[in-house]
Image (tube, rainbow, N blue to C red):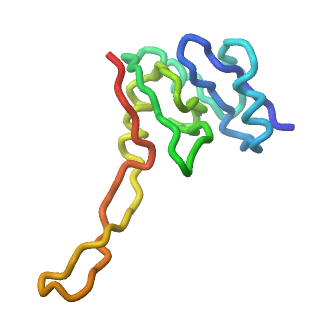
Amino acid sequence: MAETQTVNENTGAAPLPAKNPFSEEEAKEVVKKKPGLRSDDPGITTKTRDELHKQRMVRIIIDSTREEKEDVPVSVNGHSYLIKRDKEVELPLSVLEVLDNAEMTDYKQVRRENGEGYDMVPTKVKRFPYRRVF
């Protein structure tokens, strides 16, 4: 079993060790534990952790979709978070920037100009759309 960190009840996000990837079972265990941040985990640099703690915090909600209900893993320079869906969480601005930069290509059907048939047109969409909470 991979070493886990605990969920911070104030932010709703769980810092994860960058060294060991979580299985689905282990990820579920992370969100059940009490709040706390362990700074002694390998793979998490003290400098990155300290910089993230200094940043302005933002509140967001990442909603579940029909296809995606799992929590969202996000890493900044080896410092990782497991963001719970459907819950207001408080994160450093750099984590929000990672979410903003996470894009995927979606395709939509567009009728051809001559009216005969359709083309599939690629568009960039946010991989993890979120709502800001003020």
- The image shows residue 38, relative to residue 122, as above or below, that is above
Which quarter of the image is occupied by the N terminus? top right
Q: On the picture, is 32 further left or further right than 97? A: right
Which quarter of the image is occupied by the C terminus? top left
Total marks in image: 0
Quick one: which residue is furthest to the right in this view?
Answer: 1
Which residue is at a point 67% across and 12% down the rendered structure image? 35
Which residue is at a point 52% across and 29% down the rendered structure image? 86
Which residue is at a point 48% across and 35% down the rendered structure image? 63
- The image shows residue 80, relative to residue 31, as above or below, that is below
Query: Residue 8, percent across and down?
Result: 62, 15
> As rendered, which of 41 and 115 lies closer to the eye?
115
- The image shows residue 123, relative to residue 17, as above or below, that is below
Q: On the picture, is 94 further left or further right than 115? A: right
Query: Residue 39, percent across and down?
Result: 66, 19
Question: Image quarter for residue 54?
Answer: top left
Which residue is at a point 58% across and 22% down the rendered structure image? 46
Query: Residue 22, percent across and down?
Result: 74, 41
Query: Residue 53, percent across and down?
Result: 48, 16
> As rendered, which of 90 and 38 lies closer to the eye?
90
